[in-house]
Image (cartoon, rainbow, N blue to C red):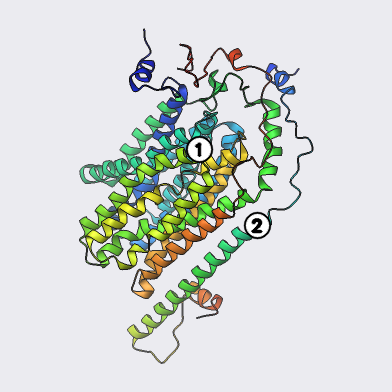
Amino acid sequence: MASATDQKQKSAVPELEGFAISRPPLLGYGLIASSVIVSVALLIYFGAWAATDRIENRALASGNVSELQDGEWWEDGLIFACPLH
Amino acid sequence: MTNPAYWLDRKFGLRNHTIAHYAWVIVAIAGVVQMVGAAIRMAFGVLVDPLVETFGWTPGSIGIAYALMSIVTALASPIAGYLGNRFGARKTMAVGTALFFIGMMWTSQTSAIWELYVAYGTVFGIAQALLLVPVVPAVAAWFRRHLGLGTGIMMVSWSLGPALVVQVLAVLFETVGWSSAFVIVGVVGTGILAFVLIYFRNTPEDASRIAYGTLPNDKPLVTEGNVFVSTQKEFQRFVYKTNAFWNLINIHFLGCVGHAVILVGIIPMAINKGVGPLTAAGVLTTISVISVSTRFITPILSDKFSAKTVMFLSFFGQGVGVFLLFTADSALDFYVFAILWSIPYGGEGTAFPVVNRQYYGHFPIGTTYGWQLLGAGLGMALGGAIPGLVFDITGTYAWAVGLSASFSLAGAVGIALLEPTRHQLIPAWPELEQDPGSLGVVEPVEGRKLSPEAGD
């Protein structure tokens, strides 16, 4: 049996009169995608810069500047991902 | 006996408003929840040194707990908003209170770094989302009109809460130690939350009252039952199809990156320019204090005029204001910056409940607001990481300041591209075929015809 609230609400079903949003929110998608891409790019760029500095500093500290130093996994990953480093 | 609220109404000469309404109790409770919830976030700054001294962990490894907490809160926000819509803010916040207690007690007994990550980073993170997300849509449900006023008063606690909680924690850390301080704050905070939740009601209909600003011809809104659940699902699908839904998440993200850079970086920036540590800390305090005014006034102006315009001005001001930091090299310069920048900064995030009302009417905004806080949380996490990262590799904060300005101004562009706020983007939320008088309360605030029973 329907509750009193539901009975009252039968008359409250919204009259949508065929309301529909047919067009996808491309502008919204585009703006949020731009922010995500720019933010990730910035993180990769600055992260790779920091990773390069850390590897160079370790090389300087060990006094072995001429040889290529091994980076940690995340340092190597950031440098690999960044086309500018 | 005369209700003191009516006496205050007369004393203040209020004509279109009244203090004698339960909506203000809800606003006060929301303020308390925000203050206690903020303890979770703000406690961290004072926690770092004691943990370094006690366990010998590095500040960097401890900082991961804060980053984890920020990200967990952000990711949990849409779920918290959905739970608030589906089961009510009161039940959701009750679960948040239980997690708050568990998190505080566990953190107080932490002896390994992984425990800190779980207790503070994860349990606290979820507790924060469950406490802070559903309360704002719940306040919105209590205001048929004048939502800006209710939101403005609630948002003031965003500034006052952290300022108060940090002081209390600092004193407790000094006197009883960090572990006991967490136990005390956990027990007292949980007690306060449990007490205020007794008086909290999700909607005016739950309390057999009517929303603030309801006029005689307004019919009650659907707030429960099968129609509520099915209409909510249907309307949420409409909301997902609007550009504003996605753009507002993006805008909140951009704005939060913009000011997180400054909030996290302003003290080291000032010290880097030769300003003393105490004076530098005063710059941040000045920002907190002055931003209270615009936290209050922005939602009211947004309600009265167009939220889109007010938000645009806030973001634009936040972006342009940081240019002052490029030339700041004395304490006076930093204080001038703090005073001028805190005005737009205070208005950056507080108009969101109002713009949601203008776009989506009385549709329950829990899930929608939760998504917006997801953007905000990720923005705070990214913005908080930028100053230290950029300074370490460039030796200057100029890049960080430039990035802060760029993100805020990008947010302003996003706002300019929002739909006009003159018309709702989705259909009107359904009303019951029932007049407000049938609920036993009559409250036409406009025209000053209050009955003694009016929702007090």
Which structural element holds mark 2?
helix
Eye-nearest disc, 2 or 1: 1
Looking at the picture, tell me which residue is in the foreground, B432 or B131.
B432
Q: Residue furthest bottom?
A: A66
Report the front residue among B285 and B70: B285
The relative height of residue B42 versus residue B195 in the rendered view (above or below) is: below
Task: Give residue B109's quadrant in the image.
Answer: top left
Q: Residue at x 56, y 50 (%)?
A: B248
Left or right, B428 with respect to B388, comes to: right
Nearest the eye: B356 or A3: B356
Q: Are marks 2 and 1 in contact (CB under 8 Å)?
A: no
Residue B456, image x and y in percent?
Answer: 45, 17
User: Which residue was labeled with disc 2?
Assistant: A27
* Amino acid bearing label 1: Asp
Question: Is residue B37 among the parts visible in the rendering?
Answer: no
Numbered label attached to residue B303: 1
Q: Amino acid at mark 2?
A: Leu
Name the outermost residue toward the top. B1
